[in-house]
Image (spheres, rainbow, N blue to C red):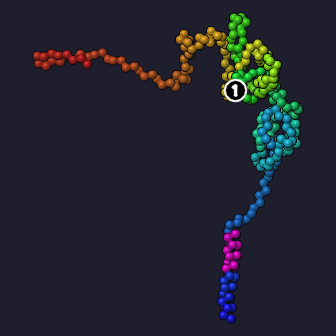
Amino acid sequence: MGNLRAVVPIALSLLIAVAGSFFLYTWVQKRTAPQQIVKVEADAVPVAVAASDLGWGTQIKTEMVRTVPYLRESLPTGYFAKAEDLRDRVLVAAVKANHPITEHMLAPREVKTGGVAAVLKEGKRAVSVKGDKVIGLAGLVQPGNRVDVLVTIEDPQKKEDKTKLILENILVLAAGTQMQKNEKGEPAPVDVYTLEVTPEEAERLALAGSEGKLQLALRHVLDTETVLTKGVNVPQMLSSLSPANPPPPPKKEEQAAAPAPKPKWTPRPAVTVEVIKGNEVSKKSF
């Protein structure tokens, strides 16, 4: 009987502890859990995006495209909802991975062949010239850049070499390497640059490439100014920056930015003062 009286309080204490713990756990769960779970079904629309980086001139295959949901309010202009709608279309602009492919990035539907021919502007021609790492600025000339073309050739009238700028602001369509046989008949890599030119520019470029040595000059992306040059021969080149031909004066903008020269100090003429003290007369110069 005495043991029962000792067990009952312990059992009641355990029961109260378990009940209190359960009640506290339930209360904490209700406090930390969200009061209401709201399921928002967004008005989403599938949009076709590039599955990986795609270069211009690429003929699109369905495996190159995947779809991701876009909110209707943020749909890009000219988007496609299915990858199948882009089958065999040709890109005229490079597309990064996960970027939507829109109509303005594509060639007309009549164009069924990819490559450089798909990205040529109407009235333009693609002409390739052979070069090397020096002509291509050690790989700095890349597709999409704009370059000037110079040629070093013998002047038939004066029978002397002359370098002249013949083309300006020319778009580079492609840059790559081809294997050709060298003078020994062995295969050797040759850099090839494909430029977008007009028919008249194509004639100039083809003649310069066959008769002289070409050099490409990389332009700034925003530089569209046309510069007319007379060309330079060996005597003119050697006389440049000589005492007889100093460099041209700076432009007005540079002159305005330059600080004004400080005036040189010039001594004033001496002043002689005659000092009379009583019978003494003296002179002092200042």
Look at 21% across and 17% down and name the residue there: 284
Q: Position of residue 175 (x, y in %)?
A: 76, 27
Quarter of the C terminus within the rendering: top left
Q: Main secondary structure of the magenta part?
A: helix
Q: Position of residue 58 (x, y in %)?
A: 83, 34
Magenta stretch bounds: 17-29
Quarter of the N terminus within the rendering: bottom right
**Residue positioned most to the bottom:** 1
Above or below 13: residue 102 = above
Quarter holding residue 263: top left
Dot 1 falls on a residue whose secondary structure is loop
Q: Is residue 19 within the magenta segment?
A: yes
- Density class for disc 1 (Cα within 10 Å; few <14, some 14-19, many ≥20) is few
Look at 60% across and 11% down and name the residue there: 238
Q: Is residue 151 within the magenta segment?
A: no
In-front residue for pair 215/112: 215
In-front residue for pair 148/191: 191
Q: Position of residue 82 (x, y in %)?
A: 85, 44
Q: Position of residue 167 (x, y in %)?
A: 72, 19
Does residue 187 appear in the picture of this structure? yes
Left or right of 273, for residue 86: right
Quarter holding residue 88: top right
- Residue bearing the label numbered 1: 138
